[in-house]
Image: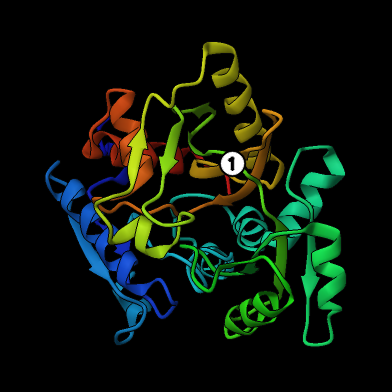
Amino acid sequence: MSFSALQGRPVAVLLGGVSSERDISLQSGLTVLEALQSQGVDALAVDPAEGDWLQQLDGVGLAFIALHGLGGEDGGLQGALQALEIPYTGSGVLGSALAMDKKRSKQLWQGIGLSTPRFITLDADADWQSVIDCLGSVFVKPAREGSSIGMSQANNVVELQSAFTRANRYAGEVVAEQFVDGPEYTVAVLGEAALPSIRLEPANTFYDYESKYVSSATRYHCPSGLDLEQEAELAAMALSAFQSLGCSVWGRVDVMRDSMGQFQVLEVNTVPGMTSHSLVPMAAAASGMDVAALVRRIVALSLEEDR
């Protein structure tokens, strides 16, 4: 695919921003910027946290969204770009907003019969003992953060209260999700296809921020070790989870496999990382695509979208 559909207009790579994932977004954005420029595309970096960034979008042919978290991945930016009639990469307003909200994603999946760990929404007046009695060990998460920010495990009432306090520092609701004792997988989605799954062996107790972006001890297995039937089952679940939220173009679906061998979907990421530690480029490489080819495909799919 060439970039002829851009008609010579530049691509603005939106990166940085003001969310808790700013540092990762800067890394992702620079990866995308370099991939575009290496293919002769006129591309510029635009950071919404700096200056009058909207003026920098004047005349661009596409906005490549590399903003992670609130302000870039939650539908607000997508709506603004649509109002300005600027094409952009990735999911639209609805898919972005739903995927960003872990609670409502899980409610939707429960409604269509897609397996996801049980959960309880927490607040300051929660019956902590009842939560532990009902779910046992849990992961406590801010419902509207990514990169495992604010997330921790709790095995008893004291740990649960502490985990809630930590998660409650961030925007949105807090959920306690039942702990799944089993391997974790991630599946990249590109267009209508699921790329080869990756099995994760995190450096720490779970795949936290350090395991994702800092540690060199985390191990990634691609191929993941599943047989053909299991790989197909996981791919089908990932695509169902992704599409049921109204997501499109590209993304990543995180899944656990419980002790009974059943896959349980955790969340969908609509603007996955593109850093040296990131999983979508890893899955793309297993499919024969380097980063430049991956970025080119994302651009092509995005320009085909009817917003």
209 and 92: which is toward the camera: 209
232 and 100: which is toward the camera: 232
Residue 118 visible to an observer of this rendering:
yes
58 and 269: which is toward the camera: 269
Coordinates of residue 92 in the picture (x, y in percent): 58, 54
The residue carrying pointer 1 sits among few (fewer than 14), some (14 to 19) or many (20 or more) residues within 10 Å by Cα, namely: many
Q: How many marks?
A: 1
Q: Is residue 283 above or below residue 216?
A: above
From the image, tell me which residue sits under label 1.
255
Color style of the picture: rainbow
Q: Give the residue drawn at x 50%, y 33%.
A: 191
Secondary structure beneath dot 1 equals: strand
Q: Quadrant of residue 224?
A: top left
Q: Horizontal placement of 33 versus 5: left or right?
A: left
Q: Quadrant of residue 65?
A: bottom left
Q: Give the residue drawn at x 20%, y 48%.
A: 36
The amino acid marked with disc number 1 is Val
Q: Is residue 17 above or below residue 135?
A: below
Quarter that holds the N terminus? top left
Q: Give the residue drawn at x 71%, y 70%.
A: 156
Coordinates of residue 227 in the picture (x, y in percent): 52, 14
Coordinates of residue 232 in the picture (x, y in percent): 58, 18
Q: Horizontal placement of 223 versus 109: left or right?
A: left
Q: Give the residue drawn at x 22%, y 54%.
A: 31
Residue 59 visible to an observer of this rendering:
no
Coordinates of residue 26 in the picture (x, y in percent): 27, 67
Q: Is residue 162 above or below residue 190?
A: below
Q: Horizontal placement of 163 versus 114: left or right?
A: left
Q: Quadrant of residue 109?
A: top right
